[in-house]
Image: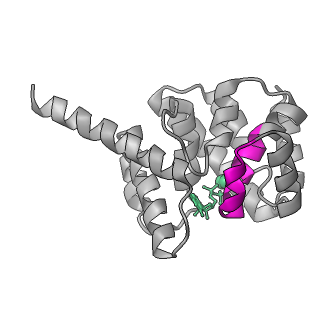
Amino acid sequence: MDLDVLLQATKKQLKPERFEHTLRVVDTAVELAKRFGADPPKAKIASILHDYCKFWSREQLTQWIKRCQLPLDLLEYHKEIWHAPVGAEVAREEFGIVDEDILQSIRSHTVGRPGMSTLEKVVYLADYIEPGRRFPGVDEVRRLAEIDLDVAVLQAMDNTILFLQSQQQPIYPLAIAARDELKRMLSGKRLREESV
Ligand code: GDP
Ligand code: FE
Ligand code: FE
């Protein structure tokens, strides 16, 4: 895979600040991949393409959602979450990416999903903590990302859900399912550790 081709194509789709964000996500994801045992070259490809469709119109995104038979319930939620699943389809159709883990990492980078792979978590977290981000609570997630991937991803998901709820925004059900699965998994792990 020629990364320069992906980078140049992505650059054409994005406003300059958004492309800068993408470059910071790439660097952060590669670092996290090394730290937590995901494949750095795959992290790079997924990160370059993750926001490819960020500025597509409602009409164009809707067309892809319908044609690719993506879940139609997406259309009942905020347009902001559509660029991730459509981005995965574009990666496959326009750039010939077949690696399911890469495609899934693009697809789940905004809301997550239950059963995320290490690569998916790495891309999700890199998007949240890249050095340009200024969310309330992001420094705490950066600190957690030094130590434990699952704990950091859970905190990022929780922050996002709580923030959206405070804005009276509906939460896409997959986001809740993803957060709750990690929460259950981590509290089970804690109980097992306490009982030894
Ligand atoms: P970005 O593309 O780098 O800006 O980051 P993301 O892809 O993570 O997020 C895009 C937007 O989607 C952010 O403003 C999030 O707050 C929002 N978002 C994430 N999950 C949900 C959700 O479940 N429902 C809604 N309505 N918005 C969400
Ligand atoms: Fe995004
Ligand atoms: Fe992003």
Ligand 2 in which quarter: bottom right
Q: In the image, what residue occupies the spot 39% across and 53% down?
A: 155
Residues rendered magenta in the picture: 70-88
Quadrant of the drawing holding the N terminus: top right
Q: Is residue 119 above or below residue 48?
A: above
The spot of residue 150 in percent (x, y) is: 39, 40
Is residue 41 shown left or right of residue 173? Answer: right
The spot of residue 118 in percent (x, y) is: 50, 31
Near-viewer residue (184 or 28): 184
Can residue 31 be seen at all in this image of the molecule?
no
Furthest-left residue in this view = 195
Q: Is residue 124 above or below residue 5?
A: below
User: Is residue 81 on the magenta stretch?
Assistant: yes
Is residue 128 shown left or right of residue 136? Answer: right
- Tell me where residue 88 sits by quadrant: top right
The spot of residue 57 in percent (x, y) is: 86, 62
Magenta highlight: main SS: helix
